[in-house]
Image (cartoon, rainbow, N blue to C red):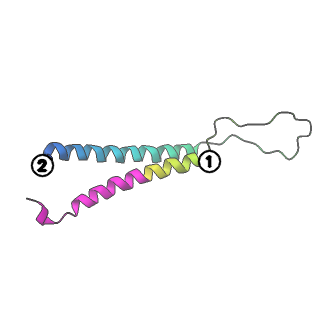
Amino acid sequence: MTANPPSGPRRVLGVRVAVSLLAVLGLVLLGAAAWFASRPTPGGWFAYAPLSDTTYVPGGTFAPGTLVLLSGAGALLIGGAVGFVVGRRSRPAADER
């Protein structure tokens, strides 16, 4: 025989805190992606450098997929948190005792 899992206010508070933290983390990731996208990219272009033995590598740039990964992860976390909240709200009234 197994015991019923606790379903009191402590469990509800823990779920609310977890969902809130996921939403905040998602917002932070989206904010970081927006901030990285607004940063100027150092770089230059030249047509011909015949006597140059060095290669120009700009500093402070991010990989092209960094912004996509940050914004995608942030959107997934926010979408998951919102979906969880909406899914919990739409519970039938017969389940509540």
Residue highlighted by disc 2: 4
- Residue at 24% from the left image edge and 47% from the top image edge: 16
Q: Residues within 10 Å of mark 1 (few under 14, many from 20)?
A: few
Q: Quadrant of the C terminus?
A: bottom left
Q: Would you say the magenta stretch is mainly helix, strand or loop?
A: helix
Q: Position of residue 92 (x, y in %)?
A: 17, 66
Q: Position of residue 15 (x, y in %)?
A: 24, 46
The mark that comes first in sequence, 2 or 1, is: 2
Q: Residues within 10 Å of mark 2 (few under 14, many from 20)?
A: few
Q: Position of residue 37 (x, y in %)?
A: 57, 47
Disc 2, SS: loop
Disc 1 marks which amino acid? Pro
Answer left or right for 43 relative to 83: right
Question: How many labels, in total?
Answer: 2
Answer left or right for 63 relative to 32: right
Name the mark on residue 25: none
Disc 2 marks which amino acid? Asn
Q: Compared to 89, does 35 lie above or below?
A: above
Q: Position of residue 29 (x, y in %)?
A: 45, 45
- Comparing 43 with 72, the one in front is 72
What segment is highlighted magenta in the picture?
Answer: 76-97
Disc 1, SS: helix
Answer left or right for 62 relative to 1: right
Q: Tell me whether the residue at label 2 lies in contact with that at label 1, contact meaning CB atoms closer than 8 angstroms.
A: no
Residue 83 in magenta?
yes
- Residue at 63% from the left image edge and 42% from the top image edge: 40
Answer left or right for 1 relative to 83: left
Residue highlighted by disc 1: 64
